[in-house]
Amino acid sequence: MLVAADSLTLHVPGIEAYVAGRHVVTGDGRLRVDLPAGCHLTDHLAQQRETVAMVEVTDLAPTPVRNRVRGRGTLTGWLAIEPTTTENDQDMVALLDLATAELTVEGHTISVGPDAFAAARPDPLAAAEADLLCHLDHHHPQAVERLCRLIPTRHLQGVRQVRPVRLDRHGVVLRLELARGDRDVRLSFGAPLRHPDHLGAEIEALLHQAHGCRSRRVH
């Protein structure tokens, strides 16, 4: 979620800053944020040196579906600055030492401890997922239609539109849009992906599997 986040908000007492695209998770499990010179948060941290902080991250579907929020995460801890050398020697690097983290996906919330967070590794498709999903949605609607053959017929009753909404190591998720409400259906790969280069073969395997099923039209 953090690798691909395009909605990331950093809160410290009295200040909030939108820092998507300026963040990275370090190898030891800390969140690093590059803060530009002259912003209110940079000036505040220059005086405080360390402060309690909270980071809110929202996972948004890159395809044009009605409810784009796929998940949310909240990280809390202590934010401290470290000097960094830039062209103007004024920008700052802030590091969040994690105390607690909560992750909410598909209505389920779990707590993640600092050790588990530090040991976690991003999904191999995370960095490219948005481009891959948009390419599938915009340029291969026939492939999406074929994949619908793998969905039980009862789930397609009343469905007005189907769009890919998630792609990860485990498979592709299709969003079935109804007149009221939506339903997400996961089509699982034969085995979890270990490398992005394996994606093509797994998609082809799903399409081959779908080829043997009767066409199931979206009503």
Image: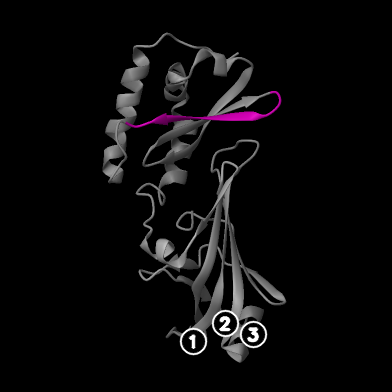
For the record, the magenta segment spans 179-189
Q: How far apart are marks 3 and 2 (CA)?
A: 11 Å
CA distance separating discs 1 and 3: 19 Å
Which of pointers 1 and 3 lies earlier in the amino acid sequence? 3
Looking at the image, is mark 2 or mark 1 earlier in the sequence?
2
Q: Residue 38: where, in percent of width, then height?
A: 62, 83
Q: Report the amino acid beneath label 1.
A: Asn
Q: Which residue occupies 45% across, 57% down?
A: 3
Q: Name the residue under label 3.
A: 44
Residue that mark 1 sits on: 88
Residue 187 colored in magenta in the image:
yes
- In this rendering, the count of numbered labels is 3
Image quarter for residue 194?
Answer: top left
Does residue 50 belong to the magenta stretch? no
Q: Which of marks 1 and 3 is in front?
A: 3
Q: Magenta stretch: dominant SS?
A: strand
**At 54% across and 66% down in the image, what residue appears?**
100
Q: Which mark is residue 37?
A: 2
Query: Is label 2 in a helix, a strand or a loop?
Result: loop
Please report whichever mark, 3 or 2, sits nearer to the chain's N-terminal start. Answer: 2
